Image (cartoon, rainbow, N blue to C red):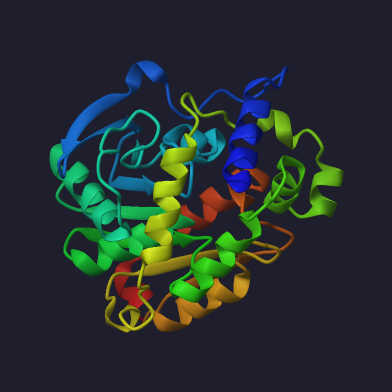
Amino acid sequence: MRRLIAFLLFFALLAGCAGRVVPPAVDPAAVRMVRANGADLACAVRGSGPPLLLVMGYGGTMDVWDPLLVDRLARTRTVILFDNRGIGRSGGADAPPTLAAMARDGLALLDGLGIGRADVLGWSMGSMIAQEMALTAPDRVGKLVLYGTACTPAAVRRALAPFDGVTTEQFMAMLFPPAWVKANPEVWKRLPVPAIPATAEAMARQREAMFAWSGTADRLAGLRCPALVVAGEEDGITPAAEGLDVAGRIPGAWLARFRGAGHWLMYQTPEGLARTVETFLATDQNLLAH
């Protein structure tokens, strides 16, 4: 329970932080509810162009996406953000989720929005959900971006282990490389704040879902959609070695490693991450296959 309290206290500290300099990625007035896979999912749509679904990670809501990253991607894409079931504004908390069920949620959300096929970008837990989406419905996922990812149960358990008994200060130190924070102390004022922070119950359900996940290591060789794996070289939660492992299992996958970046690299270099994702999405699929 202390790990959950630390996480929640961290977002409470952010909410009380004065002098915020970046507006949120999601306008509350733009949030709408879509019935998907038996749950009412909260979502928002930004920009225009080919659809790109963003799948959030552990304990996060759609408000937590870096707004500069979303703004940049929305210049050329219809960016779809949503809260996973049972967290934030979304319903569906009545049944314990699984990552496979959350993958079906993502596909059903696309159905509810009238979108037959979309590119998918998943962060951390969201990258595992994105893998399940692409493996479950390969005709529905165009290109796949896996950021801060892993593919085995053992890797997921190692990623979750640091949260056990962690204090708020220790949790904050896990997010970015210490040297980078020392050089960029203003980062805490630039982090987005969730409109409805996760409850301890919601985080416990997501943690259980990740612990129960059987992984995709033995299935990724059959993944045929173009894939980009993004890893921070100083990620202490999902180490870069895990991203290298995932990329090595996917035929023709791209691997982008960000030097001096941690698990929350999108807040360190939102423009750099956006450029990398844009380049990948804009590259001809036949070229990717080679």
Q: Residue at x 21, y 42 (%)?
A: 109
Residue 165 visible in the current orientation: yes
Q: Residue at x 33, y 21 (%)?
A: 30
List x then y, in percent, for residue 197: 50, 30
Quarter of image, res 163? bottom right
Q: Residue at x 47, y 35 (%)?
A: 198
Toward the front, the furthest residue is: 1
Q: In the displayed structure, does residue 162 sit left or right of residue 242?
A: right
Quadrant occupied by the C terminus: bottom left
Quarter of image, res 41? top left
List x then y, in percent, for residue 284: 34, 66
Q: In the displayed structure, does residue 63 sit left or right of residue 184?
A: left
Residue 191 visible in the current orientation: no
Q: Residue at x 29, y 64 (%)?
A: 132
List x then y, in percent, for residue 278: 45, 53
Q: In the displayed structure, does residue 258 sit left or right of residue 177?
A: left
Quadrant occupied by the N terminus: top right
List x then y, in percent, for residue 183: 85, 45
Considering depth in this image, is 108 or 173 the residue closer to the camera?
173
Position of residue 113 relative to residue 286, above or below, is above
Number of residue marks:
0
